[in-house]
Amino acid sequence: MVEVAGVSDPREEQLSLDAHNETWPHARFALPEVHAFKTQLLAHADLLARGNGGVLGSGFAAIHARLPERVEVLVTVPPPHRRRGAGTALYEALSAWTRERGLDEIEVVVADNDPASLAFARRRGFVEVRREKGVVLELAGIEPPPVTPPEGVEIASWADRPELARGIYEVAAEAAADVPGYEDEQPEPFEDWLAHDMQGPGDLAEATFVAVAGDEVVGYAKFSLTEARPTSAYHDLTAVRRAWRGHGVARALKASQIAWAMANGYEEIHTRNDERNAPIRRLNAEFGYVPAIGRIYLRGPLA
């Protein structure tokens, strides 16, 4: 019999994360990033499924301040523990949690190399709403790309120009509405954005690059880093003001990131982009990124 209960202490929180990391080994996290993520949420549920004397899996539900009408759910049952009812039990418990908050639909995510999880969701009425294609750039044996911003634009690290925070926020607020799959998200107030998006344990000012034209921030790009994958960097966001797109700003920012990663001992850079985001996918391909594991997002009914 499978029993599902909420995480009640740091030891259980680590067990929940362990189930996630075993299920998603290519997207492992450490507890400091989990703690920082939870501070961003209006509400969350962190559950463990137990049976046969051990942990079978975990489930997580999140309601973001930027999208309060949507519940995002992740059910993680490592392959050795599947087909024992843990996934169903977690889905039912997370559905009950969602229903208690007056909502009647959830969004789930599965890796695009996990057909069993995709079939599990589809059997329960979930429908695909978008895909993100994964790519990776292996850094061994390549030369740092040249950083060639357009005339009149300077590329600087945020660590060297901390006064640019407000300008970076303005770029983020403008660009976020144009990112396929995230059009419905509402920008947070500046101070909340600064704490949640720019000052978490995986955010480094020296690994955040800003494009400046005179006194105006026209673009920025940042990494998301984790101690769970110390040789892998992840492109978090590359954002450019609408008026400056198509002029090479994004290319210069990404080249700066690649050079920084190489100089700081990273072996690979990962990212995911919505399959509809042709400009950034084309730019990644030009830099030599190759296909990697992506994600499929589905929405469906409560149990």
Image (cartoon, rainbow, N blue to C red):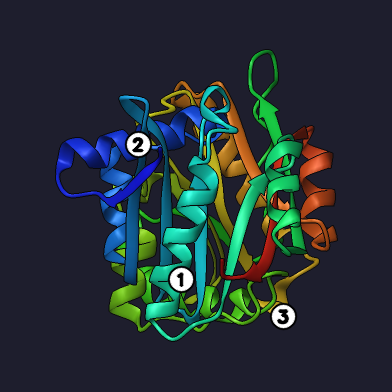
Q: Amino acid at mark 1?
A: Ile
Category of crowding for the residue at label 3, using alpha-carbon neighbours closer than 10 angstroms: few (below 14), some (14–19), many (at least 20) = few
Between circles 2 and 3, the one closer to the viewer is 2
Q: Helix, strand, or loop for circle 1?
A: helix
Label 1 and label 3: CA atoms lie apart by 15 Å
Q: Which residue is mark 2?
A: 50
- How many numbered discs? 3
Q: Looking at the picture, how far across and down is residue 204, in whole percent?
A: 35, 47
Q: Residue at 57% across / 31% down in the picture?
A: 82
Instruction: Locate residue 111 relative to residue 82 in the image: left or right.
Output: right
Q: Residue at 26% across / 35% down in the picture?
A: 14
Which quadrant of the view contains residue 169? bottom left
User: Closest to the observer: 71 or 156?
Assistant: 71
Q: Quadrant of the C terminus?
A: bottom right
Badge 1 vs badge 3, beta-carbon distance below 8 Å: no
Q: Which residue is mark 1?
A: 168
Label 1 and label 2: CA atoms lie apart by 45 Å
Closer to the chain start, of discs 1 and 3, is 1
User: Closest to the observer: 236 or 36?
Assistant: 36
Q: Helix, strand, or loop for circle 2?
A: strand
